[in-house]
Image (tube, rainbow, N blue to C red):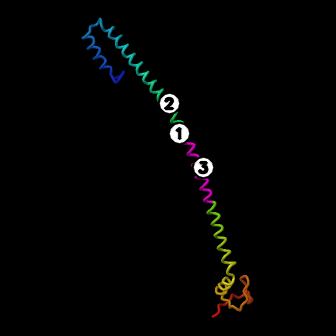
Amino acid sequence: MITFLFGISMGEILVVFLVVLLLFGADKIPEFARMMGKGINEFRKAADDIKRELDASTSDIKEDLSEVKEYLDEQKSEVEKEIKQVGEEVEDTFADRNLDASGDENSSITSNNPEDVDEVSRDVYGLDKKDDFQDGTSSSNDDEPAKPTK
């Protein structure tokens, strides 16, 4: 069935039309239709007025909301920028500390304890204390590997 205004189908409209015809007679139907038309027209005007008033009152709210949204977007971008800067600073700091730490460890091992390095090298290569050890070479025959001492 075809549905018209307010969910009223064609069959329901015919039933209403027959009831009006029986109650008021055929001569009053045009007058009743005019009265119904005016009523529907007034109802539409009232609905349009209400809609306009709601739109007008909500337009102020919409403007305020758009301003708040813009402000929040600006704040969000500023916070994200600051977080990014702090993150980059932290990464740079840790990268610098890692470089410093690795450089300090290596330099402290080699420069602060040259005797310990020589001693460890002698133990690893099996050289006596009396053997001459300079930069990984010994005074013994270079073709033969060093023999551990007992």
**Rendering coords of residue 38 (x, y %):** 37, 13
| Magenta stretch bounds | 69-91
Q: CA distance from mark 1 to mark 3?
A: 18 Å
**Rendering coords of residue 129 (x, y %):** 69, 91
Q: Which residue is mark 1?
A: 69
Which amino acid, mark 1? Lys
Which amino acid, mark 2? Asp
Quadrant containing the C terminus is bottom right
**Rendering coords of residue 86 (x, y %):** 60, 55
Classify residue 73 as left or right of residue 103: left
Q: Main secondary structure of the magenta part?
A: helix
Q: Which residue is mark 2?
A: 60
Q: Residue at x 24, y 11 (%)?
A: 23
Q: Residue furthest bottom?
A: 150
Q: Which residue is mark 3?
A: 81
The picture quadrant where one finds residue 140 is bottom right
